[in-house]
Amino acid sequence: MMAEQDIDQLLAQAAVHMTGAANSGIKAALFEVLAEFFTDSSSWWETLTVTLLPDTFDYTLTVSEGQVVRLAQVTDANGSPVAAVMPVVGTLHVARPPSTAQVVYAVVIKTVTLPTAKQQIPVAPDWVLPLWHVGILDGILGKMMNMPAKSYSNADKAVYHLRRFRKAISDARVSTLRANTHGTQAWRFPQTFSSRSQQGGVPSTANGNERMF
Amino acid sequence: MPAALETVGDYVGDARTLLQDTVQPYRYDDPSLLVALNVTLLEARRLRADLFVFHRHSLEAFNAVDDKEVRIEPPFRLAILYGLIGHALQRDQEDVQDARATAFLKLFDDILTGVRQTGLAPAQGQPTA
């Protein structure tokens, strides 16, 4: 959950940049900006524990908050890959059910979803604004300045801010892939399962050589 | 200090002050000012949908001068008041009132879509000194 102080600061800064902007409009834009940020950067993820059962292919994935966007990886207790896909968002489909019950760990990428928290603020992780508030503010400004017939409409500045917002998304994606480290190579999900084949489902995801969105 | 312009009664009361219509029997009766408030909200919704983005149901219409809340963010309440007054003044045919109605409606529009208020324009048809 984002801290109230961070949200207040963000809303106030947005209002400073856009005379005549409504708080409700800024909050609505914030939802869209966060949705784009998380969906395209794959920076918000959660590890879910799933118990696989014999002869059962499909399992419902339930996250603590947010909306599942895509499946990043599935591993067993030893860190070995488990071939699985998510053809229906929120439903894990394993290629080969185990012969006995088996616990696996599914990593899912998430984004914001409705309903929002109190005061129409989207539910998002607490680290997003402390780390990425500049980029998030650029996203809000860019999207709102792109709106027609408003006191703060400004097509030129919208281009500028949206370019900076996309840069922030790109930076967040790289930071996530490098597990928020500096001067290291791209972090990868455990590579014991790495596969270049398309037959195994998700194990080849996040190998650093492909787009994740 | 109580917040300004929170309820239907606040809007109608302040509108009567600006309309110089505070003594009964009123020149502008309650139903006519309620209609003015309701159509002003409709126009505000057209111009600034972002003000109503979290209103779950269709736009509210008010049918009594009471303490029912008019859900408008504080910085935009003056616009609603001016729009209400402008609409009410439009029913008069006097030249001066026409100019005042136009001025109030322009203020309504300026607050919602512009950066600065232009202020009330000088009334037309006034005798010059």
Image: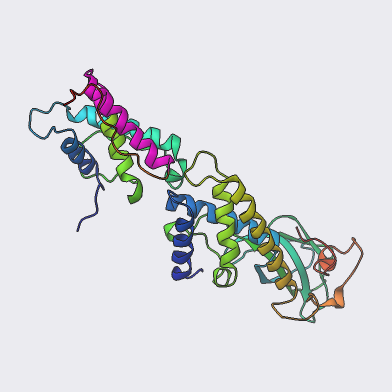
State the image quarter where residue B109 is shown: top left
Where is residue A175? Give x, y as percent.
71, 72
In the depicted structure, whether residue B115 falls above or below residue B33: below
Which residue is located at x 54 percent, y 49 percent?
A: A144
Furthest residue in direction top, as rendered? B93
* Residue farthest front in this picture: B129
Quarter of the image that includes the N terminus of chain B: bottom left
Q: In x, y percent, where is residue B22?
A: 11, 35
Q: Which residues are magenta?
A: B88-114
State the residue in front, B64 or B82.
Answer: B82
- Tell me if A41 is positioned left or right of B3 in this view: right
Say how many tags the image has. Answer: 0
Image quarter in which the C terminus of chain B is found: top left
Which residue is painted at 56% across and 69% down in the image?
Answer: A125
**On the rendered structure, is A69 left or right of B42?**
right
Residue drawn at point x = 86 percent, y = 78 percent: A192
Extreme-right residue of the structure: A197
Asked whether the viewer can see residue A133, the reply is yes
A20 w.r.t. A167: above or below? above
Residue B56 visible in the displayed image? no
Residue A208: x, y in percent?
82, 69
Foreground: B128 or B1?
A: B128
Q: Is residue B82 left or right of residue A33?
A: left
Q: Residue at x 46, y 60 (%)?
A: A11
Q: Nearer the viewer, residue A42 or A132?
A: A132
Does the stretch in magenta take in A51?
Answer: no
Scheme of image coloration: rainbow
In the rendered image, residue A114, in percent from the top left (x then y), is placed at 54, 54
Left-right relation of B80 to A53: left
Q: Is residue B100 magenta?
A: yes
Residue B113 found in image quarter: top left
